[in-house]
Amino acid sequence: DQQVKQNSPSLSVQEGRISILNCDYTNSMFDYFLWYKKYPAEGPTFLISISSIKDKNEDGRFTVFLNKSAKHLSLHIVPSQPGDSAVYFCAAREGNTGKLIFGQGTTLQVKP
Amino acid sequence: NAGVTQTPKFQVLKTGQSMTLQCAQDMNHNSMYWYRQDPGMGLRLIYYSASEGTTDKGEVPNGYNVSRLNKREFSLRLESAAPSQTSVYFCASTELSYEQYFGPGTRLTVT
């Protein structure tokens, strides 16, 4: 039973437009949510996080929104750039163990 | 700083062979992790070590063993490789327990 789900395997957007990546979770005990970015043949790199007590966190072109009642979070990238093309993983931290649970990933393609 | 390093980068094994994947970090982190990444499955935790001297099972530990050799190094051993263990393996470390730093990965094929 997957506790963190990314239901869209892929997303394609035009350069300069907004990219919205979505993630759903089932466990109310997660205390932090994170987004990681992964290029081919490299390890994932941390992008942005949000505490479960917040509903928004912004860092430059990247904003993460958390809707706890819907158990849903999203990553907005504005404006999207070709260099943003990568696989994006959503992850949630178990508050009691500190372990991260990852979603399946969404492949973002930003077209010039 | 090299961050998190993993060796080897690529490996091909025959069914039943054994091997050890090596991981080292130079960030003085307490916690280290081993994940596998399979298509459509995301990253799944195999084993982790919250601190030197401790190890715990993750989501998919069967067929693997780990050793936290010291604070820097955390190795993953496959005693008898199976085709189902064909995957990309990532090691990670953290001090804050949520922002994990990942190595470049080891691509393992078991035939």
Image (cartoon, rainbow, N blue to C red):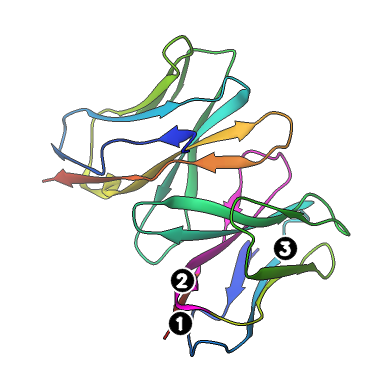
Left or right placement of residue A86 versus residue B98 in this view: left
* Left or right relative to A16: residue A95: right
> Residue B110, labelled with which disc?
1
Instruction: Find residue B110 and report its image quarter.
Output: bottom left
| SS at badge 2 | helix
Badge 3 and badge 2 in a common chain: yes
Callout 3: few (<14), some (14-19), or many (20+) C-alpha neighbours within 10 Å?
some
Query: SS class of the residue under badge 1?
Result: strand
- What residue lies at 41% left-to-right and 20% top-to-bottom? A72
Specify few, some or many for label 1: CA neighbours under 10 Å numbering under 14, 14-19, or 20 or more: some
Q: Is residue B13 above or below residue A60?
A: below
Q: Which mark is on residue B26?
A: 3
Task: Identify whether B16 is placed above or below A41.
Answer: below
> Which residue is farthest top?
A69
Going from the N terminus, do you reach mark 1 or mark 3 first?
3
The residue closer to the viewer here, B23 or A94, is A94
State whether residue A53 appears in this view.
yes
Q: What label does residue B84 carry, if any? A: 2
The answer to which quarter of the image holds residue B23 is bottom right
Q: Position of residue A51 (x, y in %)?
A: 58, 21
Q: Quadrant of the N terminus of chain B?
A: bottom right
Q: Amino acid at mark 3?
A: Asp
Q: Is residue B100 magenta?
A: yes
The percent position of residue A17, horizontal first and vertical second, equals 16, 29
